[in-house]
Image (cartoon, rainbow, N blue to C red):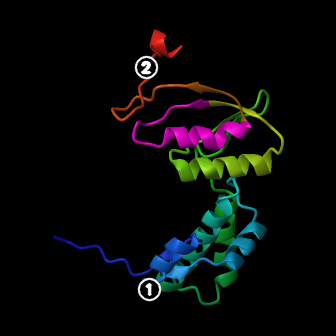
């Protein structure tokens, strides 16, 4: 049986509690300065959280290239290539604007952290705006917390049932509930 060996770990910015646990490992940590530097690259992916992702991707690429590619004398070209990759990155279904008018965006946030990141990004990108949300949720997710998080930004919610054995099924209220 083969075992996978992870030699280099790149850790994105974390909450303090998680960071204390992760610091036990030999790893490269993305700093707040790395995130500020990533902002200057103008990442192509929308969303406030994408700056941390861009900084993490940049650091991982730098470490990989330094270890596996002869970079001597080519740092500028390689740096430009990494920056171009971050600027031109596309991630279908993550804050993807499908249509400007009427406005239609899709996002695959599927847990409480993702919903929080979506809310933060929507508030930054579209201050004072309200949205119609269409949601399909898995039964094992904290969907009540997810809806509660988005409520301040919502005009309304429409729910759909995803095609999955884990989906949250709609049950109509009984006449006694009304």
Residue 46 visible from this viewpoint: no
Nearest to viewer (mark 2 / mark 1) = 2
The residue beneath circle 2 is: 171
**Residue 169 placement, left or right of 129:** left
Residue drawn at the location 78% of the way across and 33% of the way down: 100
The residue beneath circle 1 is: 26
* Residue 73 highlighted magenta (yes or no): no
Disc 2 and disc 1: Cα gap in Å?
49 Å
Which residues make up the magenta segment? 134-153
Q: Judge by depth and name the residue closer to the eye, 71 or 100.
A: 100
Residue drawn at the location 65% of the way across and 59% of the way down: 50
Q: Position of residue 103 (x, y in %)?
A: 75, 31
- The answer to whether 130 is drawn above or below residue 25 in the figure is above
Q: Label 2: state its secondary structure.
A: loop
Rate crowding at label 1 as few (under 14), some (14 to 19) or many (20 or more) other CA atoms within 10 Å.
few
**Residue 39 placement, left or right of 93:** right
């Amino acid at each position: 049986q083969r075992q996978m060996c992870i030699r280099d770990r790149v850790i994105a910015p974390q909450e303090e509690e998680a960071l204390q646990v992760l610091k036990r490992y030999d790893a490269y940590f993305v700093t707040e300065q790395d995130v500020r530097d990533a902002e200057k690259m103008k990442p192509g992916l929308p969303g406030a959280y994408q700056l941390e992702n861009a900084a993490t991707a940049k650091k991982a690429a730098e470490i990989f290239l330094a270890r596996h590619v002869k970079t001597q004398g080519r740092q500028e070209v390689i740096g430009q290539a990494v920056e171009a990759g971050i600027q031109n990155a596309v991630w279908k279904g993550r804050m993807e604007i499908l249509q400007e008018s009427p406005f239609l965006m899709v996002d695959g946030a599927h847990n409480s952290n993702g919903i929080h990141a979506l809310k933060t990004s929507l508030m930054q990108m579209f201050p004072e705006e309200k949205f119609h949300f269409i949601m399909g949720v898995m039964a094992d997710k904290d969907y009540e917390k997810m809806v509660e998080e988005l409520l301040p930004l919502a005009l309304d919610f429409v729910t759909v049932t995803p095609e999955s054995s884990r989906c949250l099924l709609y049950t109509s209220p009984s006449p006694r509930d009304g």
